[in-house]
Amino acid sequence: MASAEPESAKEAPPPPSTAAPGGMNLFLVGVVLRFVVFAAAVSSVVVMVTSKQTVVNKLRGVPPGFPVEAKFDDSPAFRYFVAALSVAAFYSLVTGLSSLFVIAKPNCHTKSLLHYAIWDTFILGVVASATGAAGGVAYIGLKGNTHVRWDKVCYAFDKFCRHVGASLATSLFASVVMVLLIWISIISLHARIRK
Amino acid sequence: MASAEPESAKEAPPPPSTAAPGGMNLFLVGVVLRFVVFAAAVSSVVVMVTSKQTVVNKLRGVPPGFPVEAKFDDSPAFRYFVAALSVAAFYSLVTGLSSLFVIAKPNCHTKSLLHYAIWDTFILGVVASATGAAGGVAYIGLKGNTHVRWDKVCYAFDKFCRHVGASLATSLFASVVMVLLIWISIISLHARIRK
């Protein structure tokens, strides 16, 4: 049967293995996960930015009747967190939308996987470090640190801390999905070698 | 010419492209970088663990003659940092040594690249978040946060803060090298598709 094919068909390199079973499915899962990261990152930023709370007569050591305000931009770690998650949201939206265009061009899948995996790695580092930084500061707010006399504040700023906690949980989720995205790219690239 | 080849040679899959120009070099660079990560992570842990400092009559608000001690395990963020960097050191040593064995078996390069890239991504997330967490707490130690009356402490614990700073710089370096390692694996996998 093969010998009946014209010579040109024989010599042509095999097409990129985008039609590999599971390859397209993995690519689609990746696209969906990008929008999941986008939703998680946007939620995280919104919840953090709307965490502002003013309390009166609640925080120990403050004169009665004197209002005290807690907002995310009082802490450099929370500012970094909002900046990093905003970048991640923008990035995942752009790559999610561009993936939709790439789906229509199977020849571009391999190159896209390479570029996405490289940038995803960078964004993962940024999101993970921002989650760590905000988490470290939030933990002091929750538990305090008696060794250096940093008092806990979450007993007074209950709404603020609930927002920060929810925002951290969402960004941790986004970090895990970023790891999955990189794994999908790596496994897809590896699968194309063996096909 | 092609038709003169025996049928079996035609149908045999191409050998794994480990002999690709640059492929072996990239793999060797990866091995070296694993030992760089190991050295950086061990240094980071050692410098953090040896940061203990006791001061008398230096920290404001403490009665004269009363000694105050600062050590890394007073802070959950620093404990997490030491645990994460220890895991990264152990991991990079194990993968560095196993890479040395893989070098002798070119057929295993592709599979190794897949496994390393998957685990590297996980370790990057852990190291980046630990660096962020410790960095967030260290920044409060350095600058304080007047909004919640967390006083800075680095003016008193100078040696402690120098150690923490050096440890953070080293772990940031280790994180960057981890990103490079993942990039190398991804680029190597991609290069093998096209060969």
Image (cartoon, coloured by chain):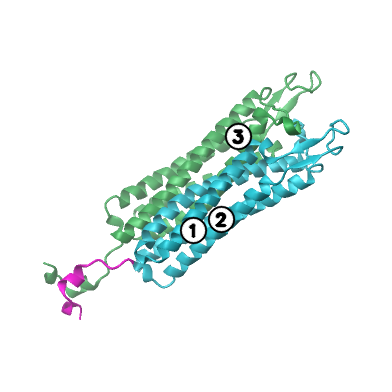
Chain colours: A green, B cyan
Q: Would you name the residue on which mark 1 appears?
A: B96
Q: Are marks 1 and 3 in contact (CB under 8 Å)?
A: no
Q: Amino acid at mark 1?
A: Gly
Residue under disc 1 on the same chain as residue under disc 3:
no
Nearest to the eye among marks 1 and 3: give it: 1
Q: Nearer the viewer, residue A74 or B128?
A: B128
Q: Secondary structure at mark 2?
A: helix
Name the kind of residue labelled 2 in the image: Phe
Q: Tell me the chain of label 3.
A: A
Residue B32 coordinates in the image, percent (x, y)? 52, 63
Residue at the far bottom: name it.
B1
Classify mark 1: helix, strand or loop: helix
Same-subunit check for callouts 3 and 2: no
Label total for image: 3
Mark 3 touches mark 2? (CB < 8 Å)? no
- Can you see residue A124? no
Q: Amino acid at mark 3?
A: Met
Q: Is residue A11 above or below residue B58?
A: below
Considering the image in quadrants, where does the C terminus of chain B appear? bottom left
Q: Residues within 10 Å of mark 2 (few under 14, many from 20)?
A: many
Residue wearing tag 3: A48
Badge 2 or badge 1: first in the primary sequence? 2
Query: What is the crowding at mark 3: few (fewer than 14 residues within 10 Å), some, or many (at least 20)?
Result: many
Q: Residues within 10 Å of mark 1 (few under 14, many from 20)?
A: many
Query: Residue B38: which numbered mark, if any?
Result: 2
B70 sits to left or right of B63: left
Q: Which residues are magenta?
A: B1-16
Residue A76 in magenta? no
